[in-house]
Image: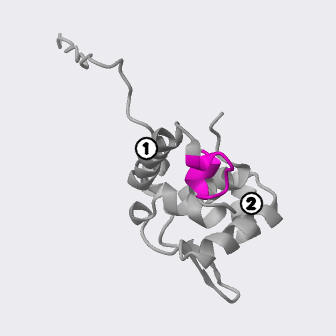
Amino acid sequence: MLRISKIMDYGTLVLTYMAGCPERLCSASELARALGLNPPTVSKVLKLLGRHGLVRSVRGVQGGYALGRPAAQISIAQVIDALEDQPFGLTECTAVPGSCDFETGCTLRENWQRINAIVRRTLEDVSVADMAQPPPLSRPPGTRAVVRRQQLV
């Protein structure tokens, strides 16, 4: 099953919260309280995001954290790269070439690499700003939205 880790989920929560108030600094304790997360976890997330320039910190009494750049310029792929211990990959051979004993004779490897590249590109195309917005109304493929006009009486 494909699933993001808890740390990645928490990182996305922190960044989307911060994207909602980009003009001000947020403390780690404020973020933890607002998001219902454990303060040490939020501190860990902020530290990892800071190492990759996705957030910046300001010291002092009035200090806190802010996005390192506009939310629209932070891709979900960059968040994964900042928070995950291993490189992105759906399989061992796509994440760390040479890590699988069957890699050289594997008949599926190229297909997994192709799928991995498609997923990676999608993650690069979705920004923190996108994640902070409500999703568009979805319709089944091949259908159009129908707008009904009401008559004014």
Q: What element carries label 2?
A: helix
Give coordinates of residue 30: x percent, y percent: 71, 65
Residue 78 as seen in the image, left or right of residue 114: right
Report the amino acid beneath label 1. Arg
Q: Which of 11 and 30 is in front in this view?
A: 11
Q: Give the quadrant of the N terminus.
A: top right
Q: In this view, does 61 lie to the left or right of 132?
A: right
Q: Is residue 20 in view?
A: no
Nearer the N terminus, badge 1 or badge 2? 2
* Kind of residue indicated by mark 2: Ala
Q: Mark 1 points at which residue?
A: 114
- The colour mode here is one colour
| Quadrant assignment for the C terminus | top left
Q: In which quarter of the image is residue 134?
A: top left
The crowding category of the residue bearing disc 2, from other C-alpha atoms within 10 Å (few below 14, some 14 to 19, many at least 20), is some
Is 105 part of what is drawn in magenta? no
> How many circles with numbers are drawn on the protein?
2
Element under label 1? helix
Is residue 82 visible in this depiction of the protein?
yes
List x then y, in percent, for residue 14.
62, 59
In this view, 90 is above or below 24: above
- In this rendering, the answer to whether 94 lies above or below 58 is above
User: Going by the image, does 117 lie left or right of 145?
Assistant: right
| Region in magenta | 91-104
Whole-percent x, y for residue 16 in the image: 54, 56
Residue at 24%, 18% (x, y): give it. Answer: 144
**Extreme-front residue of the structure:** 105
Which residue is label 2 attached to? 32
